[in-house]
Image (cartoon, grey):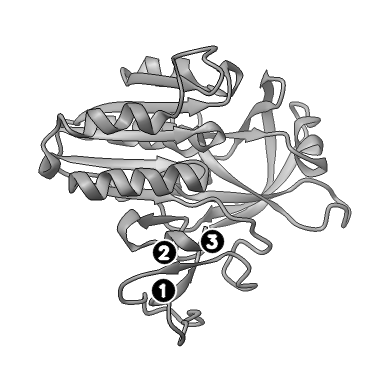
Amino acid sequence: MISEPLMVLSNERLAQDLCRMTLEAPQLAAQARPGQFVTVRVSDSYDPLLRRPLGIHRVLESGGSVQLLYKVVGRGTELLAALIPGQRLHLLGPLGNGFSLPVELDSALLVAGGIGVAPLLFLAQRILARPQPPQVELFFGGRSAQDLAALEQFEDLGVKITLSTDDGSRGQRGLITELLQPRLAGIDPARAKVFACGPTPMLKRVAQLTDMAQIACEVSLERQMACGVGSCMGCVTGVHGAPLAREGHAECSTAGPAHYERVCLEGPVFDADKVEWSDG
């Protein structure tokens, strides 16, 4: 793990509220796994107090740099968007547990909602870099065409892309899960896996669909995080099954989920069938 100021190489505004930052980060590039994240300190003062968690979007291994894709939603991300090349940003990471890369699969289906696409480009990179990689498809939904970022990078990797938007401005009008469902019916469940990141209602529906189709699925949960390292317990989620044997694990002794796990430390990636979706 690294904890140091990194130089901003570029900070592009891709749409009205979407930005992509490239940082000079050779150590992070070497250590990071798809699905992990970093926290960044957006100011040298205590305002804002908390660091911002951001998924690792892309690793440019040849140059030792890392890209972060983020949405400008408040004061912290507005300060982040104002950084210019040459300035430095204090970063802690990589943090959390990432996706489990498939070994022998025919199909890897990535499902993204809005800014949830951020960690899936890095995942596609790593899957397609494996010997005899599976076909990788991206199912990507947003409110409008402006939410559909990073499409060119997925196309450059050869990823097949299916799009939907709420307003019909690009792709099919409606929810991306409506397009995912018939696709799941056409593949061998033993030779496929689904990876999803986005809003909780979308992830819950993806979990339902993959459960019905008997296809393995991992989801990356989005939660508010204060510390990002498992100390404050502010991001726990209910999980079924045996708890992971980790010091400081937050167990639940009442009815409901078998136990609670910290999204920042045991996650953010979980098996979809282990998540207690009523918590969302």
Residue underneath mark 1: 257
Q: Secondary structure at mark 2?
A: loop
Mark-to-mark CA distance, 1 and 2: 6 Å
Could you tell me the amino acid type at mark 2? Answer: Glu
User: Residue 54: x and y, percent?
Assistant: 60, 45
Q: Can residue 164 be seen in this snapshot?
A: yes
User: Residue 179: x and y, percent?
Assistant: 33, 26
User: Residue 243: x and y, percent?
Assistant: 36, 76
**Proximity of marks 1 and 2: CB atoms separated by less than 8 Å:** yes
Could you tell me the amino acid type at mark 1? Answer: Pro
- The crowd level at tag 3 (other Cα within 10 Å; few <14, some 14-19, many 20+) is many
Residue underneath mark 3: 264
Q: Considering only order in the chain, which callout, 2 or 1, is on the residue closer to the N terminus? A: 1
Which residue is found at the position 66% from the left and 27% from the top? Answer: 19
Which of the labelled discs sits on residue 276, or is there none?
Answer: 2
- Foreground residue among 119 and 259: 259
Which residue is found at the position 57% from the left and 70% from the top? Answer: 230
- The crowd level at tag 2 (other Cα within 10 Å; few <14, some 14-19, many 20+) is some
Mark-to-mark CA distance, 3 and 2: 16 Å
When asked about the image quadrant of residue 86, the answer is top right
Q: Considering only order in the chain, which callout, 1 or 3, is on the residue closer to the N terminus? A: 1
Q: Secondary structure at mark 3?
A: loop
**166 left or right of 159?**
right
